Amino acid sequence: MGKGKRNAAIVISSSDDEDDKDFFLLKSKITSASLPRINQKKRAKRASLSNSCSSKDSIASDFGEIKRFCEEFDEGIRGFKVSTGRGMGNDLWVNKYKPGSLEELAVHKKKVEEVKVLFEERLITSEEKLCNHVLLFVGPAGVGKSATVHAIASHLGATLSEWNTPTPTIWQEHLHNSSSGLRYTSKLEEFESFVERIRKYGFISSSMSRRSQVVLLIDDLPVVNGKVAYGRLQRCLHLLVQSVCVPTVILITDYGKADSADYSMRFWEELQLSLQEAGACKVAFNPITINSLKKTLARICKEEQYETSAEQIELIAKASGGDIRHAITSLQYFCLKPKQLPSLSLSDGSSPCLSERTDEITHLYDGSSLSFGRDDTLSLFHALGKFLHNKRESETFMVSDRDAITLKEKFVRFPLKMDAPETVLRQAHGQSRPIADFLHENVLDFVSEEAIDDAWVVASYLSDADLLLTSVNGMVARNFEAENVVQSAAASVAVRGVLFGNSHPVPPRWHAIRRPKLWKVEQSLWHNKCQMLSQRCDTCNGLHLTDPSVIYTEIKPTLKWIKHRASEDFDSQETSPCHMVENIDLDGNILDDKNDMASEDEIEDW
Amino acid sequence: MLWVDKYRPKTLDKVLIHDDVAQNLKKLVTEQDCPHLLFYGPPGSGKKTLIMALLRQMFGPSADKVKVENKTWKVDAGTRTIDIELTTLLSTHHVEMNPADAGFQDRYVVQEIIKEMAKNRPLDTKGKKSFKVLVLNEVDKLSREAQHSLRRTMEKYSSSCRLILCCNSSSKVTEAVRSRCLNVRISAPTENEIVRVLEFIGKKEGLQLPPGFAARIAEKANRSLRRAILLFETCRVQQYPFTHNQAIPPMDWEEYVSEIASDIMKEQSPKRLFQVRGKLYELLTNCIPPEIILKRLLYELLKKLDSELKHEVSFWAAYYEHRMCLGQKAIFHLEAFVAKFMSIYKGFLIATFG
């Protein structure tokens, strides 16, 4: 967690009154408006925390280690939430303008209200038997999940008790520990024992939360890897949800759009589901709207006394993609060099308005080189959906009249309602071969019923793409540079071919994107081939080797026929050629799931 | 045992068709000066039969004692070693294999394995036949590199090793290899020859052949003797006392292709194209080579087509066949052909019938 440059200063501090609590790796603080004090306190706590967890037994021997820890903490970087550059004397605006009250929250009012009600319910009725105490907050990064929790808690006067994943153990430290007899406990294990304690004892230790009510906030679930670890985490959280007796908030950052191929994403969804089943109440946070982003940014500008035009603020707000933390940081960065902002350009949010379209096209590449702004990622299936649905403007307009080449009627297409296909491909991290396969598998569903000519154009472009991809395999075997170029050219041909060829797309309706059947076919083809080759010698009496294609096309069918006729019951395995290898499905399962999921969320998007 | 194997002539003397070639080969071998040989000709014309008979002529009955070996060869290719698995058939005197089975590693196969084998000379060196024979099938499917290394191997080990190459089309074999071999062209048997063979088999099996029946099979077989004999046998299984107008069952996949063809003719739409794709997949799954599918499909389509369109359709078939050879995923090109055909045919229908 603690990263970055290290100060030379050695700080060893331990606050005695909080020792027992730190021992539980549990940090309490009163969320009050006075940030600096908290920060200092926190730092001190971290130091003592490291002290307590790293040297439970042998305090004396671990001095060097403590020192190192302290150095790290001294930077004041604390978690993901508060990253103060205290030493530089210049606060990050993200922390400086952390919302202190409900009014300052950029999250939608209704959502705040909803969450507040939920909180009140849990805080007030916590003594009685409420069916669940757990709230599950889900949303993309930087939409104000934590800020909402903090703000509401302080508004209601409740104490927030946070679980923070302890600092990762670095390798040297681990060596040191194990040489000094300390057993390594993984973060997951620590989390598990923490949950265990919470379930059994609740909060007994905290000295200050005696009067006020306590809300447990689990912000930072331990990073786990592998199915076993996921399973453990899930079980552990499940237990927590079922048996915890204090109001609890679990925050899960939704990485959904970022990387689709990841197993972990599926896991998070499973986790959410299972927690909901266990009775947790899920609250989904949407990206912050551009308007409230603008409002917040404008407020900050006013307070910092920077002159920024509304246009510029809007640009920043749009570029941030609903991530307020990012937007504020961008603003701060922008205010360092006010001149850098290009006059008018948009990064990704394409607006349907025609007058803006021209600007967007001319500034398309400026947009991606904007000094701030997030590079949006797309899931592969989202990208495929874009290509297949082939949404276009309903009327054409002249981009520029001076060097317009007038195309023949049949080559003219309306402008696309998306970025350049290559950009989309890049955002989706699409590899050309799978892209081509997927397009090939699915494109026919999207061609209108009458337009067989279109189908041909598409098919011929896909055939071109296949040729390009093959040349990658053969000729330029070791030349990665060339390979890359050819690969992306092939992908581009395939995608643009599909977009161009499908000039009469069917009106948008529900479509599931299928996994290419081709893969399965290839697999079973290979399998069959091996099988037949191994049988080759039996079929032709072992005297000589026969041409495989002869076996496939002539001898095998004849044999089958004869066998079929001669003994109806003998043909246990070879009756119908076409169903011989239906069952081979080696790695299809994972993909299938992915497929379903993707098609679902794609449909929502449309 | 299938009749194709049962009635395969074992010696050069018993060969029924291409007996002139057989006699020449016999003379060649008895004169002890056997060059490298390259047999080429369409499938089902008797190349393999001649080669087998030739080996027997050279080495006597011991050439029949073969064993099949599925061996993994370790080839040292500079920085790494490559494992190549190949099925070989060996007797004491000869080795037979399909080097093209090794896929894109065929060049190592040819270079290393043949070299290795050529080095191990047969034990009975005191005899006159101090060379080993290597039978390589499907030489035309070898890559260019493999053929080049084949050339070098041929020269280097010609004292200890004779190569018999076998392929369908000599045009895909490089000049260099061809000029180092005695080329033996085996033409496809004529229908009369096929009838003769069928009648011979019928007599041996003690079957009554109605007049004209053998001729009908021969016609169906498209000048492939193997096909003819296989068809003959299926007819025999289907119904024994042959009737005059007995239907000759086609190969299942051929039937399937003609089904596809009529599908295509019936409706031209993306949906139908998708269905056709499914059927093509099924054929491919059953290892029917895509080139053969395309060829057969074209044949079926042309049968039903207005002559006005035949030229254009054939052109596109050739175009996509070529691309199929260059490309990797045959289905892309097969489908493109089907789509093109549909598009042409639909245009034609609209033009003629409005």
Image (cartoon, helix red, strand yellow):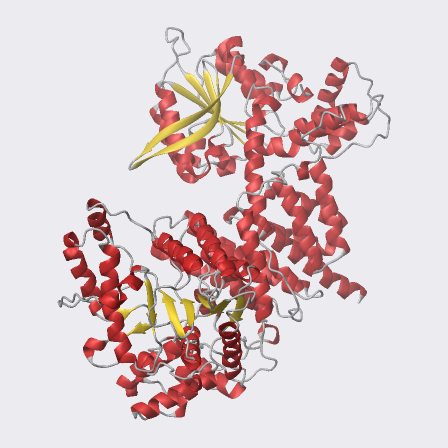
Q: Is residue A375 at all visible to an observer of this figure?
A: yes
Q: Position of residue A554 (x, y in %)?
A: 66, 31
Q: Nearer the viewer, residue A522 or A300?
A: A300
Residue B118 higher or lower than A115, as above or below = above
Q: Position of residue A531 (x, y in %)?
A: 57, 31
Q: Which image quadrant is residue A76 in?
A: bottom left
Residue A130 in percent (x, y) is at 55, 67
Q: Is residue A54 left or right of residue B104?
A: left
User: Does B65 sit left or right of B246 as displayed?
Assistant: left
| Residue drawn at point x = 47 percent, y = 72 percent | A420
The C terminus of chain A - image quarter: bottom right
Residue A172 located left or right of residue B63 = left
- Residue B192 visible in the picture: no
Total of numbered circles in the picture? 0
Find residue A330 and report its horizontal and vertical position in percent: 34, 80
Quadrant in the rendering for residue B16: top right
Front-lying residue, B113 or A149: A149
Quadrant of the rendered image containing residue A276: bottom right
Which residue is more in the foreground, A27 or B94? Answer: A27
Q: Residue at x 54, y 56 (%)?
A: A594
- The residue depicted at 29 percent of the width and 62 percent of the height is A20
In the rendered image, the residue lying farthest to the top is: B126
User: In the displayed structure, would residue B122 be above or below residue A557?
Assistant: above
Quadrant in which the N terminus of chain A is drawn? bottom left
Give the vertical position of A219 relative to B325 (above or below).
below
